[in-house]
Image: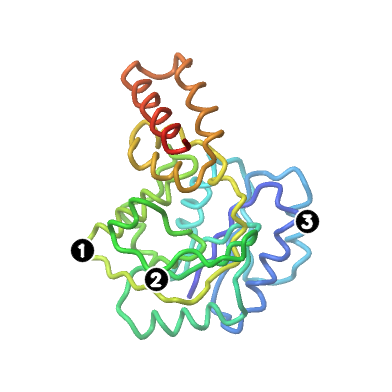
Amino acid sequence: MFSIVIPTYNSALTISKALDSLLNQTYTNFEVLIIDAKSTDETLKSIQKINDKRIKIISEPDNGIYDAMNKGVRLAKGDWIYFLGSDDQLYTLDVLKDVSHIINESEIDLLYGNVLLSDSKKIYNGEYKYINLYNRNICHQAIFYRKALFAKKSFNTDYKALADWEFNLKQFGNPRINIKYTDKIIALFHNDGFSNNFLDESFLLKKPYLYLCHGYRVLSFDIIKKHAKRLIKSDRITWKQKMKVVFILIVSTLFKS
């Protein structure tokens, strides 16, 4: 059984398409957990119009997207967890059927594939080795996790945009976890979302090298520069932390030039 976790907040314009891509799957043994952060638009009404007992809705304040994802994991009854963005869709109607065949034939704990980027129509991003993951994260809309992986560790909610990257690094770095790649496209991914436009201050301060890789590959340098300057002027961080930010700013500027 799959537990599909969808964090939502004011997702009325996109949630119906996301749910359609799930509810019309040829494989039907799954539940959908909508973890809503008290939306103020028509999100909940849009979901409630759909009469499907596999959908469960929890709407209450939370501490960001990873708090919602952790909540979904705790409530999940399935053997496997999959996180779908409220503005994303499963790529074909056979995705869950194809994935179920792979995981039933293999002793694996984590299965990942590719996503199709909605803006460029490019496929992201192939097979990873552990070292590759230091340069670029796997899109979490491409990953199926065995629920048992969350027994000892959940997403770190201190990181507002990159907690899944840290979590994936832990899994890939653990030799006891069996990981498998499939070249199938799992989802149509809307890649203009939160994590691609938000500077994760906690991640930057604790893991500056990794953040530099993320900034170079994903974030625009204007975003890095803007937030770095604000952090340098802030009274909330130490001088040592400010020096890390200055380093990020200088190297980012050199990369851009």
**Residue under circle 2?**
111
- Mark 3 nearby-residue class (10 Å; few <14, some 14–19, many ≥20): few
In the foreground, 153 or 243: 243
User: In the image, is 210 to the left or to the right of 118?
Assistant: left
For label 3, the SS is: helix
Mark 3–mark 1 distance (CA, rounded to whole Å): 45 Å
Q: CA distance from mark 2 to mark 1?
A: 15 Å
Q: Residue 90, position in %: x, y? A: 60, 70
Q: Residue furthest left?
A: 175
Residue found 53% across the figure and 78% down from its top: 96
In the picture of the structure, the residue carrying the numbered disc 1 is: 175
Q: Residue at x 58, y 80 (%)?
A: 28
User: Which marked residue is nearer to the observer: mark 2 or mark 3?
Assistant: 2
Name the residue carrying label 3: 45
**Marked residue nearer the N-terminal end (3 or 1):** 3
Amino acid on which the number 2 mark rests in the picture: Leu
Q: Amino acid at mark 3?
A: Lys
Q: Residue at x 45, y 19 (%)?
A: 232
Position in image of residue 155 (x %, y %): 41, 48
Disc 1 crowd, CA 10 A, few/some/many (<14, 14-19, 20+) = few
